[in-house]
Amino acid sequence: MKPPLPPADLRILAAVASLTGDDSLANQNVEQFPPGAFVFVSDQAAYYYRSPTSTATVASPDIVAGPYGSSVAGRWIRYGGAAADVPATVSVAFGQLAASGVTSASATLAGLLANDSIVLNPQSALAQGIAYARCAVSGTLIVGLNNAATTTIAAQTIVFDVKVIR
């Protein structure tokens, strides 16, 4: 029996720009992330998951080795299991966010199930000090913002790329 995976929030990593180069998937050390970790690769518009014991032949863009190369176990495998009935992007409107404040907003997503795991990536950079978290309830995506900065953030709409994993 396989050990259970950590919760989705611990497996979803920050997006990287490309498969190779400075801000790349190949520079992400598969050993430092839990099994099943996901990362979005911007130039591929695709998600990859960590397979810590894989020795599969490297075949870019579908199978990518980590920084230690193909002679060491551990691969990033392109993920292709998105739910087709869930939109690729969602706009979430937030009210003003006070310094050191917290707020949340929701958006309706047709086809979203309560047990779906959600991967979100903002389409543009968030203001410095802003962190976001997500929660899914059947048909509703709830996004929370936390402002660690000492300045108030104006009301805004943030567009997120959405990936649903079933």
Image (cartoon, rainbow, N blue to C red):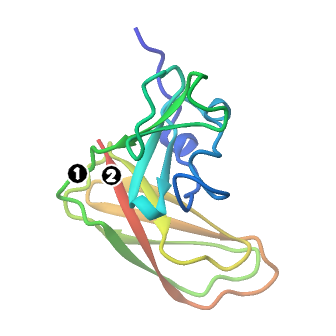
State the residue lying farthest toward the right: 150
Do tag 2 and tag 1 residues touch (Cβ < 8 Å)? yes
Answer left or right for 62 relative to 166: right
| Residue type (three-letter) at the residue carrying disc 2 | Val
Quadrant showing the C terminus? top left
Task: Work out whether residue 8 or residue 31 is closer to the camera in this orientation and state it.
Answer: 31
State the residue lying farthest toward the top: 1
Q: Badge 1 local density, few (<14 within 10 Å), some, or many (20+)?
A: some
Looking at the image, is 27 positioned above or below residue 125? above
The label on residue 146 is none
Secondary structure beneath dot 1 equals: loop
The label on residue 164 is 2
The residue under label 1 is: 83
Corner quadrant of residue 1:
top left
Q: Picture coordinates of residue 161 (x, y %)?
A: 40, 67
Task: Work out whether residue 145 or residue 118 is closer to the camera in this orientation and state it.
Answer: 118
Residue at x 60% of width, y 37% of height: 66
Q: Picture coordinates of residue 122 (x, y %)?
A: 50, 70
Looking at the image, is 40 positioned above or below residue 27? below
Residue at x 47% of width, y 55% of height: 40
Corner quadrant of residue 151:
bottom right
Answer left or right for 164 relative to 39: left
Residue at x 43% of width, y 54% of height: 119
Q: CA distance from mark 2 to mark 1?
A: 6 Å
Secondary structure beneath dot 2 equals: strand
Task: Work out whether residue 119 or residue 81 is closer to the camera in this orientation and state it.
Answer: 81
